[in-house]
Image: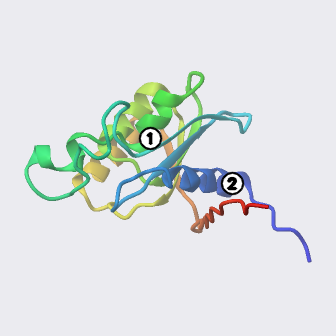
Amino acid sequence: MKNKILNWDHYFMAMAHLSANRSKDPSTQVGAVIVNDENRIVGIGYNGFPKGCDDHVFPWGREGEFLEKKYAYVVHAELNAILNANQLVKNCTIYVSLFPCNECAKAIIQSGIKKIVFESNKYKDSNEVKASMRMLDAAGVQHTQLDSTIEVNITVKKPEND
């Protein structure tokens, strides 16, 4: 039987999914990986609250007044990956499990990222994604949807005591 070898797109998208598993968001876990032209990871992130903001104090809900919902506080995976990068991300590619919103598109454009590889675009009919597409196209940022989905199954086992 021949070994299954992941191509680069699938490998980095799997890494984005792995990173998404760090998110404590009960409804949407998103991960992002930024890669340079030598296929080296330079940044990685997931959606969550900023450093120092306790996950148990701030809301994870999607309903209610603005200050009672997660949207006022969560840093998206793309922005976290940019902020966590260990070098400039100009001319890099970002792999993200969910197509970027308009706010993340601004950060992607401003940081100099030239290509987005995404898996899902489930909010494609939203005004946020329409604005994102418009800005990305105007700025010449390529965006490509994977032709398949990636499944990352994680099993954590505690070592047995000998």
Q: In this view, does 74 lie above or below 5?
A: above
Give the x, y percent position of residue 153: 61, 67
First along the sequence among labels 1 and 2: 2
Please name the residue shown 25% across and 58% down the image. 126
Left or right: 34, with 39 as reference point: left
Instruction: Count all numbered tags in the image, as a single digit.
Output: 2
Q: What element carries label 2?
A: helix
Give the x, y percent position of residue 17: 55, 56
Of 68 and 75, the residue lying toward us? 68
Of 68 and 72, the residue lying toward us? 68
Please name the residue shown 24% across and 43% down the image. 57
Give the x, y percent position of residue 116: 52, 45
The answer to which quarter of the image holds residue 34 is top right
- Residue 17 seen in this snapshot: yes
Residue positioned most to the front: 162
Q: What element carries label 1?
A: helix
The answer to which quarter of the image holds residue 75 is top left
Q: Which amino acid does label 2 sit on?
A: Tyr
Left or right: 114, with 5 as reference point: left
Identify residue for label 1.
78
Give the x, y percent position of residue 113: 52, 33
Left or right: 36, with 162 as reference point: left
Residue positioned most to the bottom: 1
Callout 1 touching callout 2 (CB < 8 Å): no
Quadrant containing the N terminus in the rendered view: bottom right
Q: What residue type is labelled 1?
A: Glu
Q: Which mark is residue 11?
A: 2
Residue positioned most to the top: 88
